[in-house]
Image (cartoon, helix red, strand yellow):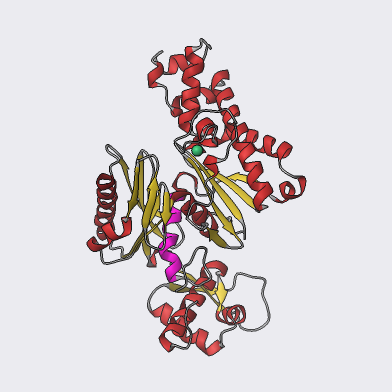
Amino acid sequence: MRSTGSLPLIKEMNRSLILETIRTKSPISRAQIAKHTGLHPSTVTRIVASLLEDGIIEEKGMHDQPKVVGRQPIMLSLVADSMHVVGVAVEITSATGLIVNLHGEVVEREEQIWESTGKDDIVQGIKSIIDRLMEKGRGRGVKILGVGIGMHGMVDHARGVCLYAPAFGWKDAPISDLLSPHYDFPIRVENNANTMALGEYWFGQSNVASLAAVKVGHAIGSGIILNESLFVGEAFSAGEIGHFTVAFDGPLCNCGNHGCLETVASIDAIVRQGRRMLRDGVTSELLHLTGTNLDALDFSHICQGAALGDQLSLQLFADAGSHIGVAVANLINMLNPRKVLIGGEIFAALDFILPKIREVVDVRALAIPRAKVEIEPVGLGRDAVAIGAVTLILRDVFGHPRPGKTME
Ligand SMILES: [Zn+2]
């Protein structure tokens, strides 16, 4: 725990507590802030004055409520564009970088396809994205508070080290230390499924005490928020739902086990299965979409096929949905969350896959936790990981306790 008794620290904590209250409860009056935080009204008035002077919050006229007798209180809310953070999603085949404001709105965007996935190339690629965004930010007169990175693999977020990036084939990359010397703001790193969960918790209208964000793409993982805190486990591997065994004699996984969820339901596994069935002679619209070149078959073809009502495409998504549904049912039985949110590259196919996931969960999850959980697409869509990554910086600015906040 933080030591208490230092006056500047108490001031800073009170300031971030008030900011957090305004962020989550606005529009809110000074009196309501005092009531909510337990701080003395004079303290609230003083700190609010300083936040107004800094342009971080603004007064919003009169209370938009039914008229009450007497003076209407002046309401306060955040100025969305008073602060900006860069969020970067580092995925297996590409990366997306965003400049995001305090409301989680995307101001600028940069994309990069990985041509090489060596350790140095990935770090260089992340740096290039940050530099391009900073250039765009300067053009807009935007000040960047810091950079949050949602990273493929297992991440020690306290040290900013990617411990293991299975798809890239390397270990122990001190991402934060490699990038920090180039910038005068903080760089924080966290696993990409975890930043997806954080983004949903902060911005995605899923501000519930417990949720699991399941990320299905070239790999499968999940970020878990329990009792309002990100749960990362003892070795930062919590939420590795992709390695749930769902098929005892299934294909070999890159983790060494057989029949992991990832081997039958990742988008690569869906494409592989599609190719296999086409080679076996199944007739399908996919043959036309790929010009009969089966090696060219990719995930977008299967999405197109499903939209056209192609039976094979629909079957591939139903099979993947069944496997994901089994894993989600296990997750629900174990964690009893309020929400399970599905995102990642699979997002484009959720219209076809989500009904199957719900159907399987209805059958396989225990009735009591099933009755309490909603299974939905991530509210932030395709940008969920990168938008979530900005919370790694924002949680230092706003109050506490924050999900995953490290208290020294
Ligand atoms: Zn595995």
Q: Is residue 298 above or below residue 402?
A: above
Residue 183 visible to an observer of this rendering: yes
Nearest the camera: 14 or 62?
Answer: 14
Q: Residue furthest front?
A: 256
Q: Residue at x 53, y 59 (%)?
A: 230
| Number of marks in picture | 0
> Where in the figure is residue 299, as x and y percent of width and height?
45, 28
How would you classify the magenta stretch by its main secondary structure? helix
Is the residue 102 above or below the residue 258 in the image? below
Tell me if I can see residue 87 in this picture. Answer: no
Describe residue 92's horizontal placement relative to residue 178 as left or right: right
- Residue 86, given in percent of the width and then of the height, sits at 35, 57
State whether residue 209 is above or below residue 361.
below
The quadrant in which the C terminus is found is: bottom left
Q: Name which quarter of the figure residue 74 lies in.
A: bottom right
Segment colored magenta? 385-397
The answer to whether residue 319 is magenta is: no
Q: Residue sitting at 66 percent across and 74 percent down?
A: 67
Q: Is residue 130 left or right of residue 200?
A: left
